[in-house]
């Protein structure tokens, strides 16, 4: 789809939904990436029951609103030079083969976790429908576990990544300190040798 300056008023109206105004003006990649991130954040915050993720959605909404109105306000020459690109580095994610090869282990863990959640929810609903009423506590207990499990797993994953980042920082700092100590030692030994030669 070719990009084209269109009605400023309609662009303004569409800008209230992240990505819609960009699509209206022909920036399909930018529009798709904005809309996808916006709705994925809503779905994720509902799924793992963490409303703090909705704060990121507010940022995405404001970014989309001002991005669309900025594009609409450009003169014809500047507008023609704007390239239609995916936002938030999504082009690297969408080149699936390269991304999967680079992060194969994490992609596998993510797929196993999502598949496990789907399976657990389906099994819970199945048991709720086939078990007699006196055994209704089983699917209810499973539903409670399933509703909290994603938050626990994702929270643990975030903590793990934070610890890994801290350890990585320490590992970078320690070799620098060791290098400085080694340099001091070599300087001292060099001075001692010079004194002995004298």
Image: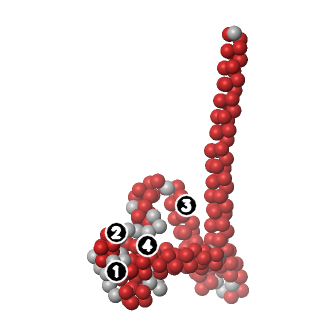
Instruction: Determine which residue is flagged by label 1.
Output: 25
Q: Is the residue marked by circle 2 packed among few (<14), some (14-19), or many (20+) residues within 10 Å?
A: few
Above or below, 197 against 130 in this view is above
The mark that comes first in sequence, 3 or 1, is 1
Instruction: Determine which residue is flagged by label 4.
Output: 33
Identify the image quadrant of residue 33: bottom left
Above or below, 8 against 154 in this view is below
Q: Nearer the viewer, residue 89 or 156?
A: 89
Residue for point 71% across, 14% down: 195
Tell me if 34 is positioned left or right of 164 in this view: left
The mark that comes first in sequence, 4 or 2, is 4
Q: Is the residue marked by circle 3 packed among few (<14), some (14-19), or many (20+) residues within 10 Å?
A: few
Residue for point 33% across, 74% down: 79
Above or below, 102 against 28 in this view is above
The mark that comes first in sequence, 3 or 2, is 2
Q: How far, Cα to Cα, is label 3 from label 1?
A: 39 Å
Q: Position of residue 31 (x, y in %)?
A: 40, 76
Q: Nearer the viewer, residue 167 or 182?
A: 182
Q: How far, Cα to Cα, is label 4 from label 2?
A: 14 Å
Q: Which mark is residue 83?
A: 2
Instruction: Determine which residue is flagged by label 3.
Output: 109
Tell me if 93 is positioned left or right of 136 in this view: left
Residue for point 37% across, 87% down: 8
The mark that comes first in sequence, 2 or 1, is 1
Q: How far, Cα to Cα, is label 3 from label 2?
A: 35 Å
Give the quadrant of the C terminus. top right
Q: Nearer the viewer, residue 113 or 90?
A: 90
Q: Position of residue 126 (x, y in %)?
A: 58, 81
Tell me if 133 is positioned left or right of 130 in this view: right
Q: Nearer the viewer, residue 11 or 131?
A: 11
Give the quadrant of the N terminus. bottom left
């Amino acid at each position: 789809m070719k990009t084209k300056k269109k009605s400023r008023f309609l662009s303004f109206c569409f800008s209230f939904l992240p990505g819609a105004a960009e699509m209206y003006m022909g920036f399909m990649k930018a529009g798709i990436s904005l809309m996808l991130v916006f709705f994925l954040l809503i779905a994720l915050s509902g799924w793992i029951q963490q409303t703090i993720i909705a704060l990121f959605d507010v940022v995405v909404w404001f970014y989309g609103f001002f991005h669309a109105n900025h594009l609409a306000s450009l003169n014809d020459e500047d507008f023609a030079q704007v390239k239609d690109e995916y936002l938030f580095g999504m082009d690297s994610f969408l080149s699936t083969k390269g991304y999967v090869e680079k992060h194969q282990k994490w992609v596998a863990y993510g797929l196993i976790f999502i598949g496990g959640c789907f399976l657990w929810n389906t099994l819970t609903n199945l048991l709720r429908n086939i078990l007699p009423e006196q055994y209704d506590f089983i699917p209810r207990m499973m539903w409670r576990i399933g509703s909290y499990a994603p938050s626990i797993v994702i929270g643990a994953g975030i903590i793990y990544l934070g610890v890994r980042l801290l350890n990585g920082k320490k590992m970078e700092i320690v070799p620098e300190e060791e290098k400085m100590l080694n340099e001091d030692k070599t300087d001292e030994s060099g001075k001692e040798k010079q004194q002995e030669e004298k």
